[in-house]
Image (cartoon, helix red, strand yellow):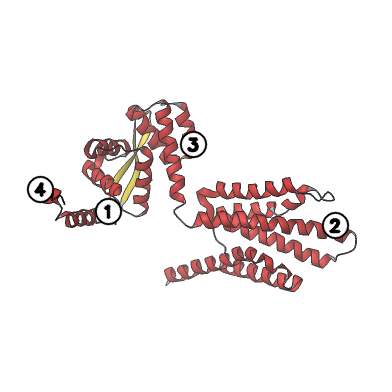
Amino acid sequence: MLGEFEYVLMTVAAGLGESAYGAAIREEIEKVAGRSCSIGALYTTIERLEKKGLLKTWMGEATAQRGGRAKRMVRVTPKGMHAAKEFYEAMMRVSRNASWATGEPERVS
Amino acid sequence: MSSLAEMAAIFLALKDRDAVLGDLAETGASGWSALGSVLGLVVRQQMELWRAWQPWVASSVAFAGSLLLLSVSFGLSVDSRHLLRGEREYGSLLCEALLMLSWAWTSGFVVGSLSGKTRWVSGILCAISCLSCVLRFQDTSLSRLCVLLFLLPGVVGAVQGVRRARLSHRTALTLAIAMTALMLVWSGMLYMQNWFLFLPAWWLVAHADRSKLSNEKAAA
């Protein structure tokens, strides 16, 4: 099963589609998930997910904005989509009776 | 982006280097922040490597193997001196030298083939054991460097291990049997205390055997 950060990264990469690469994924994670994302955490996780066959990466175009350096483009593989869907469904099942999921007021003992 | 970050990026693989430095330039990271990001990735990548068992085995073989081979090298040097005094036969010294060479080479080969990107740790562990032994060496009739006889075949083995990763089954088996027979014939059970040094040779046999089986399966 995926880890929480792995799931976040894959979901963001899937959402960015064709324009998913290191800096864009990092920016999106910080914006949407509201948490800081270090370059170290990002690239080691990408590396691990690629080894598991859940992501595919390749070197993309170089731009002047990047000092003429290439981007590492990221795409979620079909196996990755399946793993992310499994994680999402498991979280939904686990959360179904929790007060924050049902909208019921929290019981205080 | 600071030139310090660019210097630190030499520890990254080429594709990571381009991507990371490009990301830092794009986000406008500079100075210590950029350096911290690059070093953070270097440290994380190294830690990630240690999640596998191979670096642990390679480091153990490098450290424990060096300690044993230091004493084997010393024993060989002492016996060479005895040979010069006519207290030892050529045959037995040759067997001892061959054993030392093969122990060092097989240990180096296993360390080289298993270490991968963590081979610098194996190198440091080997250097620590060698240095501590050389600095504490007290026999004035022999050079301190006599304990390092195993280093050259060990390093040659390590370099070949990095390049080839595995031996053919026949070569590995022949080597392991020859080493074991040589020790039994030459010293009886005297050198059985060094049983640890046979593990790399037999590990190479087991490793070669598995690759042979998988090749046969692929062919079928």
The subunit letter for the residue under badge 4 reads A
Residue on which the image places disc 2: B81
Given contact means CB atoms under 8 Å apart, are the residues at marks 4 and 3 in contact? no
Looking at the image, can residue B18 be seen?
yes
Element carrying mark 3: helix
Image quadrant assignment for residue B205: bottom right
Given contact means CB atoms under 8 Å apart, are the residues at marks 2 and 1 in contact? no
- Camera-near label (4 vs 3) is 4
User: Mark 4 to mark 2: distance in Å?
Assistant: 88 Å
Given contact means CB atoms under 8 Å apart, are the residues at marks 1 and 3 in contact? no
- Camera-near label (2 vs 1) is 2
Mark 3 or mark 2: name the one nearer the start of the chain.
3
The subunit letter for the residue under badge 2 reads B
User: Mark 1 to mark 3: distance in Å?
Assistant: 31 Å
Q: Nearer the viewer, residue B123 or A74?
A: B123
Looking at the image, can residue B13 be seen?
no
Seen from this angle, which residue lies furthest left? A104
On the same chain, marks 2 and 1? The answer is: no
Residue on which the image places disc 4: A105
The subunit letter for the residue under badge 1 reads A
Relative image position of residue B20 (x, y in whole percent): 39, 36
Above or below: residue B38 compared with residue B190: above
Relative image position of residue B107 (x, y in whole percent): 62, 59
Residue on which the image places disc 1: A80
Given contact means CB atoms under 8 Å apart, are the residues at marks 3 and 2 in contact? no
Q: Nearer the viewer, residue B179 or B187?
A: B187
